[in-house]
Image (cartoon, rainbow, N blue to C red):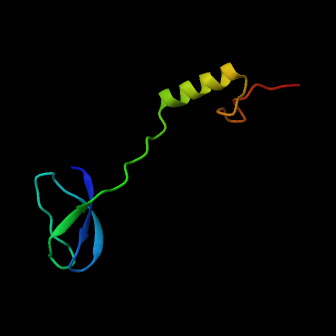
Amino acid sequence: MPLYDFHCKPCNKTFELLVKASSTPVCPECGGSLEKQVSCTATIGKSAALISSARAKAMSEGHFSNYSPSERPRTK
């Protein structure tokens, strides 16, 4: 079930609700009808593949900004 943002016109409140796509939710405050809102999409989290490709690109360019200090090569 996806999360949706809804706005209630009678009580002028906005809610984030987890609902089935086929259901019609009502306002938890006043019981009025809700209007579905456009909401922001979730950002992509860090995955092993993204980190690996970023590190490979950084190494090919000669910098180690994508590595933690303990993983960086030691220079004398």
Percent across and percent down for residue 26 are: 15, 69
Q: Is residue 69 above or below residue 73?
A: below
Query: Residue at the top extreme?
Result: 60
Q: Is residue 56 above or below residue 22?
A: above
Percent across and percent down for residue 20 are: 16, 53
Q: Residue at x 14, y 71 (%)?
A: 33
Q: As drawn, is 7 to the left or to the right of 47? A: left
Task: Name which quarter of the figure residue 54 lies in.
Answer: top right
Q: As drawn, is 5 to the left or to the right of 54? A: left
Percent across and percent down for residue 28 are: 20, 73
Tell me the quarter of the image containing the C terminus: top right
Closer to the camera, 40 or 48? 40
Query: Residue at the right extreme?
Result: 76
Q: Residue at x 61, y 23 (%)?
A: 57
Closer to the camera, 13 or 48? 13
Percent across and percent down for residue 66 are: 64, 33
Q: Is residue 33 above or below residue 56?
A: below
Closer to the camera, 33 or 53? 33
Q: Is residue 6 above or below residue 39?
A: below
Q: Residue at x 14, y 76 (%)?
A: 31
Q: Residue at x 72, y 35 (%)?
A: 69
Q: How many marks?
A: 0
